[in-house]
Image (cartoon, rainbow, N blue to C red):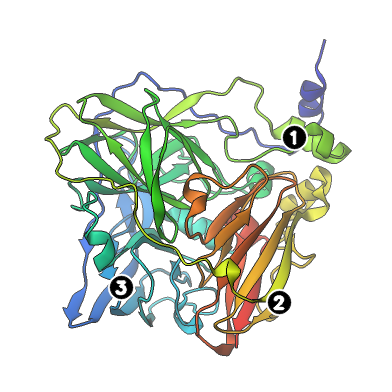
């Protein structure tokens, strides 16, 4: 007998694109060398640090024998790792060698609006943009990426993203693994759909599934490399994990289920290290972990694909159309594990690094006077798959909304007072999870449906809001005043951002 799910899939097969399915390779031995992005420290003159970045096209070999057209910053694909420290004044010249207008946004950085690199700071072909600001926040794994209006998803997918590491004196005293490329590694995880000729396949005009759910692919890259093997030199390894994918949510664990310690979240160190054996990381989130490989084993970091990039409402919470959508887009097969990269610790030497329980002290701003409470209601177009499909096929830029409005670059949605504390309630009234990002702040999560744990105990600039969930975050806005130039808040599923799930605020 044909099941209800099979019936709906058959009924609407002509209008949908099948979801790419990752191949299970749990027993495969990886041999591609783990790529460590080149480290750039800039030219230092006292506390002033000068960087020169070039946004460019390139060719990369991702599949054997195939040349993949890519975009990068100071290299063919992705960006080099920038590094500076608290108290530095950075001066970053960004030149655009592409034939397309782009931007470069400093994600997670507290900075003046004109330096933010959002849609209001476009860099036209052949032009150079200067971003200058003082680093006034603790040590953290931040990042930078394109943020061009309506084109962020495609441009990041092509390669315009990199990591920005901030150091401070306090964190250096902890004795954590901190030798870049030796026991301290950026891990930028992305998924791509790659054509037989090696080229990336982004969203086609009739790619309804990607338009609705966000672009996901069947090939996993770490720092631009598939099937990579990290040959550990030390027995204690720090991994600065960035979910650089457009839409996929990763559920990460090691294949032997070993425990590891979470030491930092988006905005820096936790107050105390947390021992876990799995983490969930949404697009744009960063989690720093330390793993002990003193046993000399070969281990694999895997993605447990139970959600495979989306959170699902319980059937009792869904309407008729949402139930159909879930029937269409859900995978009938049992959840599987997929490899991210491997670590070979057979030649690792004993490490002198440590992971103390106490890492830092966070200020409890929730006890300060609350100047304003705001609500952000996240919705998808009518929550109807038929409307969604129609709009996606027609190529609308206004598929998603916050508080009933799609992004309008000429409209200011909120006005915030500098130096004040606010609480924002984020309500997800849709059938899938949304990672919500706010520019210019690091916030604390006050409550969540399933509790606050792991990296969500730390300072955050992205929080994953599950279907039907309401949560609150508290933040103190830095004293950068500009009533003409806005910052953004948006869903960090990049296709949702590009289709309207974004708003603007100014700080006065």
What x and y, as percent, mark residue 505? Answer: 63, 77
Find residue 269 and report its horizontal and vertical position in percent. Answer: 38, 56
User: Which residue is farthest front?
Assistant: 367
Q: Tell me the residue that label 2 is attached to.
A: 413
Image point (67%, 46%), residue name = 466
Q: Is residue 217 above or below residue 295?
A: below
Mark 1 falls on what kind of element?
A: helix
Left or right: where 355 falls relative to 498: left
Residue denoted by label 1 = 326
**Quadrant placement of the N terminus:** top right
Mark nearer the viewer, 1 or 2: 2
In this rendering, position of residue 416 left or right of residue 219: right
Q: Horizontal and vertical percent for residue 382?
A: 83, 52
Q: Secondary structure at mark 3?
A: loop
Label 1 and label 3: CA atoms lie apart by 46 Å
The answer to whether residue 419 shows anywhere in this view is: yes
CB contact under 8 Å: marks 1 and 2: no
Residue 86 - label? 3
């Amino acid at each position: 007998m044909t099941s209800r799910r099979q019936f709906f899939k058959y009924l609407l097969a002509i209008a949908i694109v099948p979801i790419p399915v990752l191949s299970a390779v749990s027993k495969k031995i990886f041999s591609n060398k783990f790529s460590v992005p080149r480290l750039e420290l800039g030219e230092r003159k006292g506390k002033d640090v000068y960087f020169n970045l070039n946004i460019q096209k390139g060719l990369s070999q991702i599949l054997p024998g195939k040349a993949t057209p890519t975009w990068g910053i100071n290299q063919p694909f992705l960006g080099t790792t920038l590094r500076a420290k608290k108290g530095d004044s950075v001066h970053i010249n960004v030149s655009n060698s592409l034939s397309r207008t782009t931007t470069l946004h400093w994600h997670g950085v507290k900075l003046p609006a004109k330096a933010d690199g959002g849609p209001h700071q476009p860099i036209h072909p052949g032009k150079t943009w200067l971003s200058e600001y003082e680093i006034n926040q603790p040590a953290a794994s931040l990042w930078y990426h394109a943020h061009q209006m309506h084109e962020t998803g495609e441009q990041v997918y092509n390669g315009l993203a990199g990591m920005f590491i901030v150091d401070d004196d306090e964190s250096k005293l902890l004795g954590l693994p901190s030798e870049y490329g030796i026991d301290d590694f950026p891990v930028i995880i992305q998924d791509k759909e790659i054509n037989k000729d090696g080229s990336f396949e982004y969203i086609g005009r009739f790619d309804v599934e990607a338009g609705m759910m966000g672009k996901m692919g069947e090939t996993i890259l770490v720092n631009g490399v598939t099937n990579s093997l990290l040959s550990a030199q030390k027995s204690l390894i720090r991994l600065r994990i960035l979910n650089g994918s457009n839409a996929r949510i990763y559920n990460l664990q090691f294949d032997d289920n070993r425990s590891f310690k979470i030491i930092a979240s988006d905005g820096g160190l936790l107050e105390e290290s947390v021992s876990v054996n799995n983490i969930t990381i949404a697009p744009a989130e960063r989690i720093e972990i330390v793993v002990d490989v003193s046993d000399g084993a070969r281990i694999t970091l895997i993605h447990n694909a139970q959600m495979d990039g989306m959170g699902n409402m319980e059937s009792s919470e869904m309407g008729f159309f949402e139930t159909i959508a879930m029937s269409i887009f859900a995978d009938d097969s049992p959840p599987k594990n997929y490899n991210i990269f491997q670590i070979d610790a057979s030649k690792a030497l004993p490490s002198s690094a440590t992971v103390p329980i106490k890492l830092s002290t966070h200020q409890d701003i929730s006890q300060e006077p609350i100047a304003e409470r705001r609500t952000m209601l996240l919705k998808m177009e009518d929550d109807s798959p038929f409307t969604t499909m129609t709009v996606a096929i027609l190529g609308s830029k206004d598929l998603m909304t916050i508080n009933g409005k799609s992004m309008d670059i000429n409209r200011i949605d909120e006005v915030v007072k500098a130096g004040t504390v606010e609480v924002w309630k984020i309500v997800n009234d849709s059938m899938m999870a949304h990672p919500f990002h706010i520019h210019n702040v690091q916030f604390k999560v006050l409550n969540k449906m399933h509790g606050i744990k792991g990296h969500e105990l730390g300072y955050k600039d992205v929080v994953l809001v599950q279907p039907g969930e309401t949560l609150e975050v508290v933040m103190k806005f830095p004293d950068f005043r500009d009533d003409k130039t806005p910052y953004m808040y948006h869903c960090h599923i990049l296709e949702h951002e590009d289709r309207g799930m974004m708003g603007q605020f100014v700080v006065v």
